Amino acid sequence: MKIIRKTIGFFYFTTLLLSCGRVPEELHTVRINGLDILYSVRGPVDGKPVVLMHGNGGSHKSMVTQQLQLAKAGYRVYCPDTRGQGANAPLDEYHYADFAEDCYCFIKTLGLEKPVVGGWSDGGINALLLELAHPGTSSMIVAAGANLYPDCGEGFEEFKSWILEQGTPLVMMMLNEPDINPRDLSAITCPALVTVGSKDLISVEHTKLISDNIPDAELTVFEGANHGSYIKKNPRLGRRMLEFMRSRGY
């Protein structure tokens, strides 16, 4: 297991945003498990596929910076709105296992051949669960700010109070889910990039528990970053993903 700490300058960030703005977006809808799912796709049609999944309450726009970075690098990048979120109709009940199953059906329905599957927060959890439920679906996975169970850091009690205040089915899911046994992660045989911010709600120790239990994993800690600051309108995660993917020949 390899630990890498990364920083990036403002100049690179500004240049990236200016250059990536020219990458066109396509919006489509696909029928998955009885639900209409909106998704965004960018990048050359013949580019190697990457699927990126957003966090709780987000949409296909949540990881647009990473989508643009990867698309400009030549990958075909798909960003679906998770069931009941984004442009999709809300639901009365949510479970991480359903999100992961939707992702699997999304990949199969679109005929994507062993894509890189990554995500942020809930999306990172889904990437882990997808590969546990359907081994070999992904060429590699990226789990950014993921957790194995709710009590994953010192700030959980405060976060729990926020969950109870919100009270929506989507948010309340996080009180008891996910429930992943760290030892089960040893079944994930594809390469995995696991990331966290040094000031994340999810502790570095908890994130290290994830990377330590995946046989072929690399852990990256983004110094000074919280749960979303290295992802929202920030190229740090995308740059690290490109390094990781290229180092593994993808």
Image (cartoon, grey):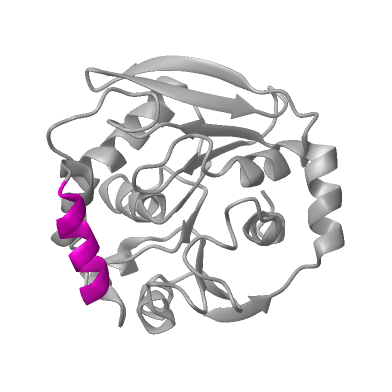
Residue 166 versus residue 214 in the image, above or below: above
Out of 22 and 168, give the one closest to the viewer.
Answer: 168
Q: Is residue 199 magenta?
A: no
Q: Check the image and name the residue furthest to the front.
A: 165
Q: Position of residue 179 (x, y in %)?
A: 18, 62
Which quarter of the figure has residue 185? bottom left
Q: Residue at x 27, y 22 (%)?
A: 89
Residue 11 versus residue 126 in the image, above or below: below
Residue 8 versus residue 224 in the image, above or below: above
* Left or right of residue 228: residue 212: left
Q: Residue at x 20, y 51 (%)?
A: 166
Out of 223 and 190, give the one closest to the viewer.
Answer: 223
Residue 196 versus residue 58 in the image, above or below: below
Q: Position of residue 160 (x, y in %)?
A: 20, 67
Specify start and end residues of the magenta stretch as a single range: 157-167
* Left or right of residue 205: residue 97: left
Is residue 180 shown to the viewer in this render? no
